[in-house]
Amino acid sequence: MSSAGREVRLAALRPTEVAAAMARAPVAWLPMGAVEYHAPHLPFGTDSVTAERVVTDAASLVGGVVLPPSIVTMGTLHLPWSLRYDATLVEAVARSTVEQLADAGARVVVVHTGHAPLDLLHLLKRVCHEVETRRNAAGEPRFRAMALCYLELNAALSAALGTDWPVVVDHGSITETSWMLAITPELVDLDALPPDDDTPIVGIYGPHPVGRASASLGAAQLQAGVTLLAERVAGLLAGDRPDPLADLRILVGRYWPEPMTVGPGPTEGGESTGTLLLGHGGPVSRYLTALGGTIDGLPLDPARLLLRNPSPGEAGVAVRAADLGAESGFYIRRGQSATLELPEALGPGPHDVRLTIGLAGVTTTELVTTLTVD
């Protein structure tokens, strides 16, 4: 039930109630979550809980009906009980759901995901754009479909940061823990975490939440995000057609300021193995969507460059730079290093390295350094 007291959850509504809700505002809200490990202190359904609460509260302001959360998603951590599905299945389910909701009478469909890997986000945005475009051309010019995640709302608002790091999203850290403390505090067990701030904890990407996360911070971010989302959906009903990547550009531009690093990889017998290390010490994960550049002025062939992230929770499989894209990117999270395997080992002496890296499918950055191989 919404915070305003009117039931908006489709699963709890009878047919006449659904008809009345759609007559007031023809909006269908689809929350997407996941079954995913969120460190010892948070439940596996964290992403579903937050996603559903955002759209339920927004629906109480705008109207419409809220579907049950979907867990058919991808990009979860490679840890036990974290479920993930093939991208083709995720796309098929998302597309079919949006189309069926439109067929049922929704003039606006909102897909909001509390599980926020950027490959999933780009996929959902593309599917919504394609369904909207097709239906507009087929005689429904006012139909709108929008996909977003809560981190975009936070980024657009700089919502109630209140932390010692300049971010609006994390995994199991201050933000997600605060949201869960605000929504379902009975499901949070901060005592399950070690008290030492310096202890690495698998499943937490960000600062230690104990002493920093709070229900008040979560409630402030939640309310700000709900208000903004409600305003935007009201605009969609009025015929607005917003740029689907605008908030993502804000997120990357404002909250990914720290440059990554590139350094020499391991050696064998004192000789280079032809591997570089891409490091990331900033607070927010980097999502690489392209990679190229030069070494000593000679261009690198992305088809012959391999990326691998062996960190706990990551897949650890090799990814060709040529295969990177908005929906097939490569994560290097806070404090992690990934290897970049070159087609040939570097000889002794200094080398001018210039890497051009696509970030999040919306911008690029350059890493320029001189590496010396002994």
Image (cartoon, rainbow, N blue to C red):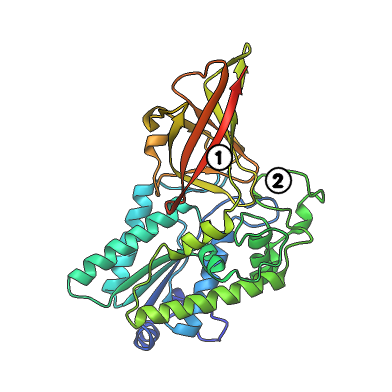
Please determine whether, in this image, residue 249 is positioned above or below residue 7. above
Which quarter of the picture shows residue 174? bottom right
- Whether tag 2 and tag 1 are in contact, CB under 8 A, the answer is no
Please determine whether, in this image, residue 373 is positioned above or below residue 214. above
Q: Name the residue under label 1.
A: 314
| Residue 306 can be seen in this image | yes
Which quarter of the picture shows residue 221? bottom right
Residue 1 in the image: x percent, y percent? 54, 79
**Residue at the extreme right:** 195
Q: Name the element at disc 2.
A: loop
Residue 217 in the image: x percent, y percent? 69, 70
Crowding near the residue tagged with mark 1, few <14, some 14–19, many ≥20 C-alpha atoms within 10 Å: some
Quarter of the image that includes the C terminus: top right
Please determine whether, in this image, residue 357 is positioned above or below residue 23. above
Would you say 206 lies left or right of 147 here? right
Q: Identity of the amino acid at label 1?
A: Glu
Q: Name the element at disc 1.
A: loop
Q: Which residue is drawn at 60% across and 23% down?
A: 372
Crowding near the residue tagged with mark 2, few <14, some 14–19, many ≥20 C-alpha atoms within 10 Å: some
Residue 238 in the image: x percent, y percent? 34, 83
Q: Mark 2 points at which residue?
A: 201
Reading the chain from its start, which is encountered first: label 2 or label 1? 2
**Residue at the extreme left:** 138
Q: Residue at x 32, y 80 (%)?
A: 239
Would you say 369 lies left or right of 106 here? right
Residue 135 in the image: x percent, y percent? 23, 69
Q: Which residue is drawn at 77% across and 58% down?
A: 210
